[in-house]
Amino acid sequence: AGLGFFVDLTKPNFIGRDILLKTKENGLREKLVPFKMQGKGPPPRPHYSVFENGERIGEVTSGTQSPSLNWGVGMAYIKASHARIGAKIEIEIRGQKFPATIEKKPLYKKS
């Protein structure tokens, strides 16, 4: 979730230290990314699957219809290798796939 700067890995013997060192060495398997739905459609919701080129790459953690942006937005954990700003993805909603794009944070209308 990008919170590694809160942890001092030079401190010895704390719970979770070994796995954090391994993750730092090998890189993250998943990343939390914001996305924007393309066009009209039902809003994204937690636990919906995320796809890229037909491959399931992750899962929506939160989503809604943004009243200020007037489109669906959400956050999803996806495979780190697919976490590219501007990447075209699909969100499966009630058995149908709807197009979306990975965006840069934060998701709000700039004035």
Image: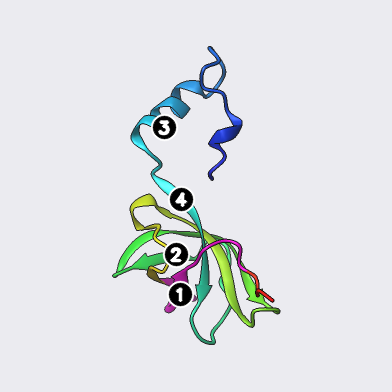
How would you rate the neighbour count of disc 1 (Cα within 10 Å): few for under 14, some for 14-19, many for 20 or more? many
Residue 92 image point, x, y percent: 44, 72
Q: Marks 3 and 2: which is nearer the front?
A: 3
Q: Which mark is residue 31?
A: 4
Which residue position is annotated with label 1? 100
| Earlier sequence position, callout 2 versus callout 1 | 2
The answer to which image quadrant residue 42 occupies is bottom right
Kind of residue at badge 3 = Lys
Element at label 2: strand
Earlier in the chain: of badge 2 and badge 4, it is 4
The residue shown at (57%, 17%) is: 14
Residue pictured at 57% horizontal, 62% vertical: 46
Q: CA distance from mark 3 to mark 4?
A: 13 Å
Cα–Cα gap, marks 1 and 4 = 17 Å
**Picture quadrant where residue 66 is located:** bottom right
- Label 2, label 1: how far apart the Cα atoms are: 12 Å
Q: Amino acid at mark 2?
A: Ser
- Are dots 2 and 1 in contact, CB under 8 Å? no
Disc 3 target residue: 24
Quadrant location of the N terminus in the rendered image: top right
The amino acid type found where label 1 is placed reads Ala
Callout 4 amino acid: Lys
Q: Which mark is residue 49?
A: 2
Q: Disc 3 or 1, which lies upstream in sequence?
A: 3
Which span is picked out in magenta?
90-107
Which element carries disc 1, helix, strand or loop? Answer: strand
